[in-house]
Image: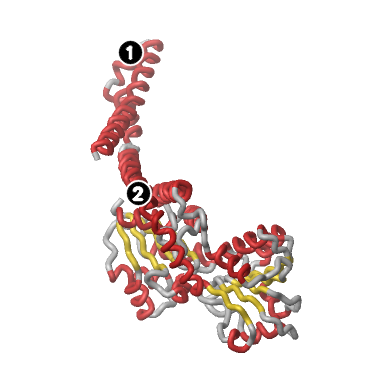
Amino acid sequence: MKNFKIIAFTHKNTELKDIGRFHIDANDCSSRLNFLKSSMELKELMYLSTCNRVEFLLNYHTEITPFFLIDFFKSFNPQWTNEEAMWAAKNAFTYEGEEAILHFFNVASSIDSLVVGEREIITQVRNSFELSRELGISGDLIRLVVRKTIEAAKQVYTQTAIATKSVSIVSLANRKLKDLKVKDDARLLIIGAGQTNSSLAKYLKKHKFKNFTIFNRTLSKAEMLAEELKGKAYPLTELENYRGGFDVLITCTGSAGQIVTEELYAKLLGDDKNKKVIIDLAVPNDFDVNISKNFPVHLIEVASLKTIAEENLEKRHQELDACKLIIAENLTEFKLMHKTRMVELAMSDVPKMVRDIKEMALGTVFAKEVSSLDEQAKETLDKILAYVEKKYISVPMKMAKEILLEEKIKK
């Protein structure tokens, strides 16, 4: 378990605009993460990226030092200068062993989230693991961690009231629309068809909004979302030519630069002089904030939701003790599960060793004696040896698990 490490950038140690510097475009994930894993000689790697955090989960055999971190970020982004890599190394949170497990339980249970009770994080954790598995960069240790992490998070959500009044980024944005009395027939122009925008759009559809137009870099993703929303889909390259008008503009892309400039906004607006609602959930921002100085807009962005999140944290503090108790119990269970798995892995070669010994005995050491046996005797001998072979591995495994269980009871 000591080989499990986490390198993290969250709203607690990094400004939201800077977290965007760690975003990896979906098309580059395979090449960049595989390069990072191989160049740093990591046994396993998993990459988690959300609107307010980026976390690297590692299976690595030595301690994480400042020098390791600098090399790590140079490999993460070879285009970065030494100063940029040193900045990342200086600002990173690092966790190792049991502390890392506990941190990740807190992340998936939303205790460590910008918005406490934000259930989306558990889906993001699961999707990030599936990606790492598909890319072939994660293995047995990260699999065990993620499996137990999701179990712990589900218990927190079902056995406490921390998420009963969820105020995720999605629900906060929807609440803002209600406060502004936006009608359900409003024209919603959505830029980006990623998870955040998709979740918000589907949430709005449940709340009777019905007029959706989606632009996305990959047209097929926009079309899939538009089909579910009964809206229209276009490639992002056609955005500047769009003249269908809008009442609410929602944007969240992985672009490193601003998508909605003053010039583009003026084109989208046309002759419409009415005040618009802008929801910018991207990190860094997709929306040029100078637009709000020259056009009548209600601007809603991720950073502006932080105050509300802090208020909700105060309201929910009574649930935190119950959540932490559940997480502590799951941490204890994980340590037992991890020990059991280590025993299984350590003994995984025993069956082959036993078979090799059996074959050596039959084919070499006692070959002469075996050859003198009749067929019935040989058959009986084979059955006896097969039985012994099976019990030779099952008995010590059972004993090892019983010892581990006794350790748990004593504690």
Residue 227 seen in render: yes
Amino acid identity at mark 1: Ser
* Numbered-mark total: 2
Q: Residue at x 37, y 74 (%)?
A: 88
Residue 15 image-quadrant placement: bottom left
- Looking at the image, which is closer to me, 363 or 144? 144
Q: Callout 2, which amino acid?
A: Leu
For the C terminus, give its image quadrant. Answer: top left
User: Looking at the rendered structure, which numbered label has been put on residue 325?
Assistant: 2
> Which of the 4 image quadrants contains residue 337?
top left
Rendered location of residue 247, percent (x, y) = 69, 75
Q: Secondary structure at mark 2?
A: helix
Residue 34 in view in this figure: no
Tell me how far mark 1 sits from mark 2, CA to CA: 67 Å
Residue sitting at x 36%, y 46%: 330
Check the image and tell me how it is coloured: secondary structure
Task: Determine contact: label 1, label 2, CB under 8 Å.
Answer: no
Residue 142's disc is none
User: x, y percentage for residue 153?
Assistant: 44, 51
The residue identified by callout 1 is 372
> Where is residue 215 drawn, in percent x and y?
67, 70
Q: Going from the N terminus, do you reach mark 1 or mark 2 first?
A: 2
> Can you tell which of label 1 and label 2 is closer to the viewer?
2
* Between 172 and 123, the one nearer to me in the picture: 172
Q: 151 above or below 40?
A: above
The residue at the point 70 percent across, 63 percent down is 209
Return the residue found at the far left.
Answer: 410
